[in-house]
Image: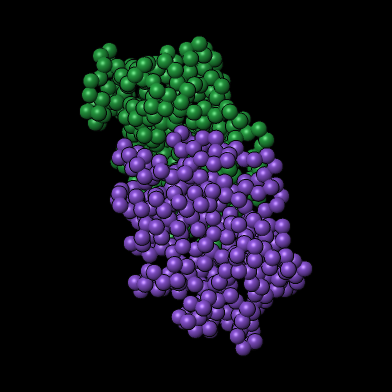
Chain colours: A purple, B green
Amino acid sequence: MTLHEFAVIEKFFKIIARSGDGVVLGPGDDCALLSVPPGHELCVSTDTLIEGVHFPSRSAAALVAQRTVAANLSDLAAMGAMPFACLLAMTLPAADETWLAAFSKRLSSLLDAAGLPLVGGNLSRSAPISLTMTVMGTVPAGSAVRRTGARQGDGIFVTGTLGDAREGLGRLLAGDRDGYLAERYANPPSRITVAHRLRDLASAMIDLSDGLAGDIVHIMEASGVGAEIRMDSLPLSNALIAQVGQQQAARMALFGGDDYELCFTAPMSRADAIQAIATETRTPITRIGRVTGERLRVIDLQGDPVEDLAGYQHF
Amino acid sequence: MTLHEFAVIEKFFKIIARSGDGVVLGPGDDCALLSVPPGHELCVSTDTLIEGVHFPSRSAAALVAQRTVAANLSDLAAMGAMPFACLLAMTLPAADETWLAAFSKRLSSLLDAAGLPLVGGNLSRSAPISLTMTVMGTVPAGSAVRRTGARQGDGIFVTGTLGDAREGLGRLLAGDRDGYLAERYANPPSRITVAHRLRDLASAMIDLSDGLAGDIVHIMEASGVGAEIRMDSLPLSNALIAQVGQQQAARMALFGGDDYELCFTAPMSRADAIQAIATETRTPITRIGRVTGERLRVIDLQGDPVEDLAGYQHF
């Protein structure tokens, strides 16, 4: 790293919250030092977001900060973990001070809100813009929600509404930055609080980053089960239906990525407790289907099984 | 991530050692789960290596694996930490199976040797090749060696020989892949074992990634001290002296980066104990100067202070 890069780090990343319970030593040494609470396990995950691949070229700095944090928090939420600390490796083509000021300001407020101190990082010069965040969270030992616990007969649930981010990205690329759908793509909500409350009820959980139909297969494979999803049960926003119609909205809910909502399974006996959590955390939770014996079955809006799921996903 | 990328991960990264003490759950869920030993703190650091920036374009896959692991292990060594776990976020322009096979094979053997299980990662498609590793290590609580503990009168020590990697990179770019110096660049030694032994003796420690003269300033600033380094004390390999001469070799030792050796300070009363560790771990340790009250002074081979250090570093 050049001296110039140190100056950039000093200037823009000193403002970022870096203290937190368990942070013994923050950035500035060869390593940060963390103290995991006794009786807890550490959850760790890493995600890379690249300009032109994971977000549009010339995106606003705030959007990049929001999606980087959302993608990483979402992995913690999917385990039922509470945020503990993060590191951020940034690759930037140039030290653009305007961009950096906007990025670090937004990042700082997001990490503050999440209770996720930034304890280390790396800055490299290259194109395109690339951000690799590593997040750490904590769970009481043995209580993390894995993908492996789904059982036949469990209900399948999702948080929020699905498909918005897919259409929102389209709106954004078309120049509509300020609409509801564009905002759903640009700034996905954190599901940390609701996930934490669901930890003892959910039998399996995953975050929806690539699209429901693809992501749920990971639960099915890990748990050795099948799933039946009813398209007429998928939670769709009024904004999405108004924009693309019911049929297309349901397809986007199934196959559109980037929502960062949660999909989880739980015994049907827990349905009332789950709805109570939805109410208390003001997070919509919708049952969209059930865990079955084998394969993924999707029931379309007419009540018929979709025969060719792969062919069905073009929109 | 596309299904194709999952297939690549499955094929090439399943072979990599992923179990280890403290790994409750390895890759394959939203997060890995780790259990830090009671009474220990976690050391974490992240480093990015980019093709054409941090290693030459079209480098051999083995070299890329070696330098990625070396850069990251070196940060753990600098704290006196023992390896615990790592995550690897890879960006590749294409799923080149030959490259991936060579990379994952070499990575696997390096992580095995280091006792550093790979517990998670990310694969993205973009150019250029970029690798961001996040390493975690453990130290008994309170025992990590920071940069802040250097005291006036302490000796300044380094491991190994310095400057080899700088000339080695030059040899490599000139097409000489197999010489001693090229190998010093391509495959820096791990200093984890000696660092672990030095943990209770060193007052401050840092790894040498950017060059001694630059890196030692971080210890000086963190500790609020100065340093005097004698160029006639710098440990130089016979190969480097034979290649570039004594004077140039000493400059490369001062200003050349990429060595991943350790620089540490310790009370002179510990000099004998330090030499005993050098012998036991078969790691050369050389005293190169002393901690002073203020600023960095370099004494040249003629015994005179170097007046213009910045102007002195061109080679």
Q: Nearer the viewer, residue A222 or B222?
A: B222
| Foreground residue among B23 and A212 | A212
B221 vs A23, left or right, is left
Query: Is residue B163 shown to the viewer in this render?
Result: no
Residue A232 percent coordinates (x, y): 61, 81
Which quadrant does the N terminus of chain A fall into? top left
Q: Nearer the viewer, residue B176 or A252?
A: A252
* Residue positioned 64% across, 66% down in the render: A279
| Residue B10 drawn above or below residue B26 | below
Tell which residue pokes out farthest to the right in this image.
A269
Q: Residue at x 38, y 60 (%)?
A: A51
Q: Is residue A12 visible?
A: yes
Q: Going 58% across and 39% down the picture, which residue do you hit?
A: A22
Indicate whether A177 appears above or below A246: above
List x then y, in percent, for residue B75.
48, 35
Q: Is residue A304 left or right of residue B309?
A: right
- Residue A203's x, y, as percent? 71, 62
The furthest residue to the bottom: A302
In the image, taking residue A214 as reference, residue A268 lies left or right, namely: right
The part of the image, by quadrant, that contains residue A58 is: bottom left
Residue A116 image position (x, y, % from top left): 52, 48
Q: Residue at x 29, y 16 (%)?
A: B299
Number of numbered discs on residues = 0
